[in-house]
Amino acid sequence: MSSTTTTPVIQATDLEKTFRDLRAVDGLSFTVQSGECFGLLGPNGAGKTTTIRMLYGFSRPSGGKLTVFDRDVTTELRAIKQRLGICQQEDNLDPDLTVRQNLQVYARYFNIPSSEAAPRIDRLLSFVRLDNRQEARIIELSGGMKRRLILARALLNNPELLILDEPTTGLDPQSRQQIWQRLAELKAEGMTILLTTHYMEEAAQLCDRLIIVDNGQILVEGSPQALINEHAGRELLEVRQPDQDVRRWLQNRGVSLEDLGYRLLVTGEAAHHTYHDLRQTYPEVAADLRMGNLEDVFLRLTGKDLRE
């Protein structure tokens, strides 16, 4: 029996990007399969946005190989761009135009006839819940509305790959949830999505697989739950604002202890028993036994220091 293999939508092999003496991307290798939501996570300066910009042709790779739809980004970028939808970090909507006019202008970039663009725009404005604001000017929109409009614009050319660079940064929880709902619907329809985000809950909800990068290199790769199980544990003990007595007590128990300064995390099988012993020894301490999450993994692998 013969077997068939599916060519990845994105394939990066030893990808590099250097700016003078800075190697922003240092040998990344990963694939994104058709129909999956793939996450690219990392602290500020890790190389995420640089990688994204190489994918849509804003920046040329310094080394390695990068293909999208089995086409080389350095030689076949025009053909690739026709099949991409890009939701950038920046708000680059035209403030002098209305919501609908912004989409009409963008449709012309892809040579979409007006007769075809009009029903697409109607459908997309309804999809992002902006159909009642289509005559509003950009200055009248909230931050969440602008992000939803940028998402609609990225979908205007019926892309096969949607690239989202921190699509919900700076939004309030309600606006963020609306974006997540729209993305979940696109994912259910089988769209391939590449997502960068600083919201670990966003990545956990949407991504089938992800990589965490730092200093331009991959630290780990896998599904969100697999990474949580491996690096945080299904259950962990969190101790908030521990004093020196509590800190020493935990250290003397020989448990797997993650010290984040303002809080301590006990991971592994010992977390459950340690929690109950801690409650008996220090009943007043602020502590919880909870499920591990992707943020625990992220902090354990990349550290707690602030990146600018």
Image (tube, rainbow, N blue to C red):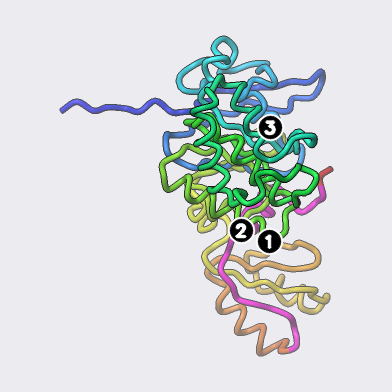
Closer to the camera in the image, 153 or 71: 153
User: What x and y, as percent, mark residue 123?
Assistant: 51, 42
Q: Residue furthest top?
A: 75
Q: Label 2 belongs to which residue?
A: 177
Does the image show residue 66? no
Q: In terms of sequence position, does the residue under pointer 1 or pointer 3 come before the other?
A: 1
Q: Which amino acid type is shown beneath numbered disc 2?
A: Gln
Q: With respect to residue 62, does 304 lie above or below?
A: below
In the rendered image, the vertical position of residue 58 relative to residue 252, given as above or below: above
Q: Quadrant of the C terminus?
A: top right
Label 1 to label 2: alpha-carbon separation: 6 Å
| Quadrant placement of the N terminus | top left
Residue 287 is one of the magenta-drawn residues: yes
Whether pointer 1 and pointer 3 mark residues with C-beta atoms closer than 8 Å, the reply is no
Task: State the image coordinates of residue 277 (x, y, percent, origin top left).
Answer: 62, 84
x 71%, y 70%: residue? 251
Quarter-of-image position of residue 27: top right
Which comes before the other along the chain, label 2 or label 3? 2
Answer left or right for 188 relative to 238: left
Few, some or many C-alpha atoms within 10 Å of disc 1 (few <14, some 14-19, many ≥20)?
Answer: few
Q: Find the magenta span and give its range.
A: 284-306
Mark 3 residue type:
Gly
Q: Are marks 1 and 2 in contact (CB under 8 Å)?
A: yes
Residue 216, disc: 3
Observer-nearest of 41 and 216: 41
Residue at x-position 57% and y-position 14%: 78
Tell me if residue 51 is in the magenta stretch.
Answer: no
User: Residue at the location (56% across, 18% down)?
Assistant: 65
For badge 1, the amino acid type reads Pro
**Secondary structure found at label 1:** helix
**Label 1 belongs to which residue?**
173
Select label 1 or label 3 by which is in front: 1
